[in-house]
Image (spheres, rainbow, N blue to C red):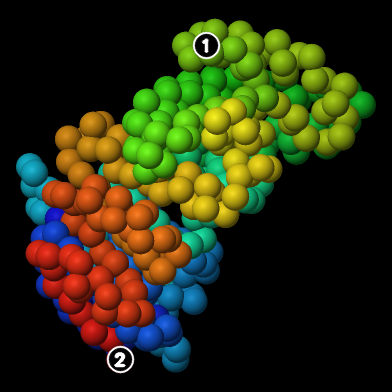
Amino acid sequence: MIISELKLINFRNYDTLKIEFHPEMNIFVGENAKGKTNIIEAIYICAIGKSFRTLKDKEMIKEDKEESYIKIEILRKDKEVIIEIVLGEKKRIKINKRKVTKKGDFLGNLNVVIFAPEDLRIIKDGPTERRKFIDNEISQIYPRYYHILKQYYKILQQRNKAIKKNIKKRENIEMWDEQLLNSGSLLIAYRKKFLKKLNVITNPIHRKITEEKEKLEIIYKSSVVHEEKDETQEIYKKFKEQLKNTKEEEKKGFTVVGPHKDDLLFFINKKNVKKYGSQGQQRTTVLSLKLAEIRLIKEEIGEYPILLLDDVMSEIDRKRQKHLLENLEGIQTFITTTTENLNKIIERKKTFYLS
């Protein structure tokens, strides 16, 4: 998978921009606030459908303009894909000139893995950040997952409304249970299988980076299933039992169990990385995670995803930089940096200077 060209109109600080990319390494050099991350952001939007920096499309439109335009041309192993996105009062998306209205139909046309300083939030922040991480990654590989996820949260919203209206009586609540159980069980099954595969890939990567000193383990902490079961039917039975057992707790006014309450836990040598890991260990955990994502996507779709490295080289030491760069063979990579040091150590590249 290679991005051959990107075109921007009225996007962030750019009036117009057209770039042809190198098939392997693309380095954007410039001081802060010159637009390096804006290019990374535009690529990311074409993969995920939203920014990793803001929830408001309006913030990505150049000041005093009503709309911005992004066009990206992608070469895949079996096809060419052109994605066009207009950001304005309403987001409009076309793939190969055909209008796309459902995000589930949009996902999977461009696969990316992004590594930015903010990714430490996966470790440091609360469960919401980790659920967002796993949901984004699975949705890229399996667009059906996104459909189920969206459906689950709609059902959850309706069920919570019913709970609040019928806080003493359980009228109109059970009608949502079956739908919640069906979609929720599928989500948990997808997540558990994904984590199982990710663990297999992540641990050897982490051991290599740490020179065999550390063993990394990722655990899926479910509010529904505490065993290693990942069959949907078994999860469904356990979910149904948990839903029945938490009727009293639901008097708080919301559904207290389900995939919307789940979390990921990271352990190094059996110790919780969030609680006991050093800054270096937390960074290494995220680096291992990102490298594992790349390999997992390759295994699942048969192509390497695009790698976006937004100002992370200054955040990791030389040893980790070296390990990262050694693992990028055959992967089109986009790097933003404030220095030219990378030009000295990276071959097969194209450098863009932003001033």
Q: Secondary structure at mark 2?
A: loop
Of residue 103 and residue 89, the one placed in the foreground of this image is 103
State whether residue 225 appears in this view.
yes
Would residue 352 appear left or right of 54 to someone viewing this image?
left
The residue under the point 21% across, 80% down is: 352
The residue under the point 40% across, 34% down is: 212
Q: Which residue is mark 1?
A: 229
Q: Secondary structure at mark 1?
A: loop
Query: Residue 213, how many percent across, how many down?
Result: 45, 35
Foreground mark, 2 or 1, reads 2
Of residue 347 and residue 50, the one placed in the foreground of this image is 347
Of residue 112 and residue 71, the one placed in the foreground of this image is 112
Marks 2 and 1 sit apart, C-alpha to C-alpha, by 54 Å
Few, some or many C-alpha atoms within 10 Å of disc 1 (few <14, some 14-19, many ≥20)? Answer: some
Few, some or many C-alpha atoms within 10 Å of disc 2 (few <14, some 14-19, many ≥20)? Answer: few
Query: Residue 226, how many percent across, how many down?
Result: 63, 16
Query: Residue 186, how many percent across, how many down?
Result: 48, 22
The residue under the point 30% across, 52% down is: 324
Is 200 drawn above or below residue 39 in the view shown? Answer: above
Amino acid type, mark 1: Lys
State whether residue 259 appears in this view.
no
Splitting the image into 4 quarters, where does residue 254 fall? top right
Query: Residue 17, how many percent across, how many down?
Result: 23, 82
Q: Which residue is mark 2?
A: 355
Please tell me which of labels 2 and 1 falls first in the chain. Answer: 1
Amino acid type, mark 2: Ser
